């Protein structure tokens, strides 16, 4: 059985966040992935959506234009 992986083949380590823009892992996590146990991989994978959301927050919607009467 292959190891679980969040990789989506968009491997770009962001120089600001230090996270992969594709999966959200750190460079150290990516390097160690093959040596991690399945429970460790699953624990990290569970944290990735929140990690990516914090690193790339949705922009605030622009306010509606003022109505002129």
Image (cartoon, rainbow, N blue to C red):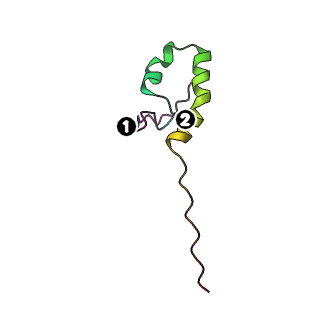
Q: Give the residues drawn in magenta, as a range.
A: 1-20
Residue drawn at 37 percent across, 37 percent down = 15
Residue drawn at 48 percent across, 34 percent down = 9
User: Residue 35: x percent and y percent?
Assistant: 50, 13
User: Residue 45: x percent and y percent?
Assistant: 59, 27
Secondary structure of residue under mark 2? helix
Secondary structure of residue under mark 1? loop
Between 60 and 8, the one lying in front of the other is 60
Left or right: where does residue 18 sit relative to residue 7?
A: left
Q: Would residue 5 be counted in the magenta stretch?
A: yes
Q: Residue furthest bottom?
A: 69
Q: Is the C terminus in the top left, top right, bottom left or bottom right quadrant?
A: bottom right
Task: Establish if 31 lies above or below 22.
Answer: above
Residue drawn at 46 percent across, 28 percent down = 26
Left or right: where does residue 14 sit relative to residue 36?
A: left
Residue drawn at 50 percent across, 40 percent down = 55
Q: Would residue 39 be counted in the magenta stretch?
A: no
Which numbered dot is residue 38? none
Residue that mark 2 sits on: 51
CA separation, marks 2 and 1?
Answer: 15 Å
Mark 2 vs 1, N-terminal side: 1
Q: Is the N terminus in the top left, top right, bottom left or bottom right quadrant?
A: top right
Q: Contact (CB < 8 A) between labels 2 and 1?
A: no
User: Residue 33: x percent and y percent?
Assistant: 50, 19
In this rendering, does residue 48 appear at all?
yes
Magenta segment, principal secondary structure? Answer: loop
Residue that mark 1 sits on: 15
User: Residue 58: x percent and y percent?
Assistant: 55, 50
Quadrant of residue 61 within the rendered picture: bottom right
Q: Circle 1: is it few (<14), some (14-19), or many (20+) Cα within 10 Å?
A: few
């Amino acid at each position: 059985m292959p190891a679980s992986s969040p990789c989506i083949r968009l491997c770009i380590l962001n120089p600001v966040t230090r996270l992969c823009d594709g999966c959200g892992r750190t460079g150290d996590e990516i390097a160690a992935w093959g040596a991690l146990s399945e429970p460790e991989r699953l624990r990290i994978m569970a944290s990735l959506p929140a990690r990516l959301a914090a690193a790339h927050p949705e922009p605030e919607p622009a306010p509606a234009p003022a109505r002129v009467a």
